[in-house]
């Protein structure tokens, strides 16, 4: 959580301190902050009102959230750094958190006849979870893997539901859920109506950065073709 040393400047402005270590932000109380200064550990950042928390900025894309409501949300947040190759959610285990991806890239995949099948990718900044597992608290059928070292903020299932009493949070969740449903329907429609080459062309047009960041084998799996077939499509388009 973005907690740590809080205080007032001579002008009375509120300040928040965060220690940024090599792997990302870290919790800091007064003693930890002092130690970081003395030892030269990480980078100490002063968050001014202009430096809005990335999750709050994301919420504001969907609905306005007051300072009081944001503080209730912020009190529930924990931050973690996920190394590339690690999994946030694993098939067969219950997903107990709702996540916000501040930085990085994720892959959702399932196992089918002993083979990984990529469902989709999530780029920062965005919210994510294993929806059915999170909602039902039953084991997940999918795995969520970090393709790059990622910074993730998480809320427990208990806190996420308790926050629904906060109007701005409830409105944000409703709008985001609608967007995710529309996105999922669009993917299913593409799978049924578009060829792998046309889907790849669409990725190049709409998400060129993603194409450059994702390994070929995962892109091929997402498109439902062998890596060799994707290589042929790439040569054809160059």
Image (cartoon, helix red, strand yellow):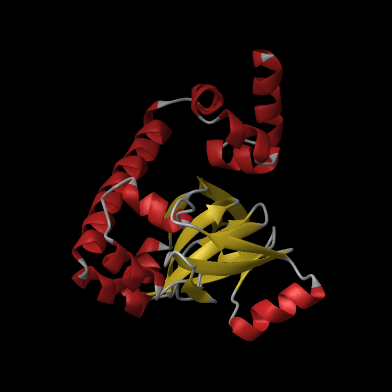
Give the vertical position of 44 relative to 182 (above or below): below
Decide which of 215, 221 is in the foreground and name it. 215
Decide which of 78, 46 is in the foreground and name it. 46
Task: Residue at 48% x, 25% y: name it.
Answer: 195
Quadrant of the image occupied by residue 159 = bottom left
Does residue 114 appear in the picture of this structure?
no
Decide which of 2, 79 is in the foreground and name it. 2
Task: Residue at 26% x, 62% y: name it.
Answer: 169
Location of the C terminus by quadrant is: top right
Give the vertical position of 204 relative to 100 (above or below): above
Report x, y in % for residue 171: 21, 56
Report x, y in % for residue 101: 51, 56
Report x, y in % for residue 188: 37, 39
Looking at the image, residue 26 sits to the left or right of residue 198; the answer is right
Instruction: Please identify the residue farthest to the right as the structure is shown.
Output: 39
Quadrant of the image occupied by residue 61 = top left
Instruction: Please identify the residue farthest to the bottom as the structure is shown.
Output: 31
Quadrant of the image occupied by residue 208 = top right
Give the vertical position of 53 relative to 182 (above or below): below
Instruction: Please identify the residue farthest to the front as the structure is shown.
Output: 10
Does residue 156 appear in the picture of this structure?
yes
Q: How many marks?
A: 0
Report x, y in % for residue 200: 55, 27
Task: Residue at 69% x, 35% y: name it.
Answer: 227
Looking at the image, residue 180 sits to the left or right of residue 53; the answer is left
Looking at the image, residue 80 sits to the left or right of residue 38; the answer is left
Task: Residue at 35% x, 53% y: name it.
Answer: 59
């Amino acid at each position: 959580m973005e907690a740590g040393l809080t205080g007032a400047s001579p002008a009375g402005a509120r300040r928040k301190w965060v220690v940024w270590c090599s792997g990302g932000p870290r919790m800091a109380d007064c003693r930890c902050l002092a130690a970081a200064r003395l030892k030269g550990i990480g980078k100490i950042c002063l968050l001014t009102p202009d430096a809005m928390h990335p999750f709050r900025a994301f919420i504001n894309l969907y609905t306005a959230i007051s300072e009081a409501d944001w503080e209730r949300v912020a009190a529930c947040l924990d931050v973690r750094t996920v190394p590339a190759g690690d999994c946030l959610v694993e098939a067969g285990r219950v997903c107990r958190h709702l996540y916000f991806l501040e930085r990085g890239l994720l892959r959702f995949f399932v196992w089918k006849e002993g083979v990984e099948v990529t469902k989709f990718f999530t780029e920062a900044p965005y919210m994510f979870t294993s929806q059915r597992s999170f909602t039902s608290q039953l084991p997940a059928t999918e795995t969520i893997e970090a393709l790059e070292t990622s910074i993730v903020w998480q809320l427990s299932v208990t806190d996420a539901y308790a926050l629904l009493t906060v109007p701005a949070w409830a409105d944000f969740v409703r709008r985001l859920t609608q967007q995710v449903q529309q996105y999922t329907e669009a993917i299913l429609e593409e799978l049924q109506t578009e060829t792998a080459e046309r889907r790849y062309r669409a990725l190049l047009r709409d998400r060129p950065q993603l194409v450059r960041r994702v390994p070929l084998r995962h892109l091929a799996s997402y498109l439902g073709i062998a890596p060799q077939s994707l290589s042929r499509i790439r040569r054809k388009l160059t």
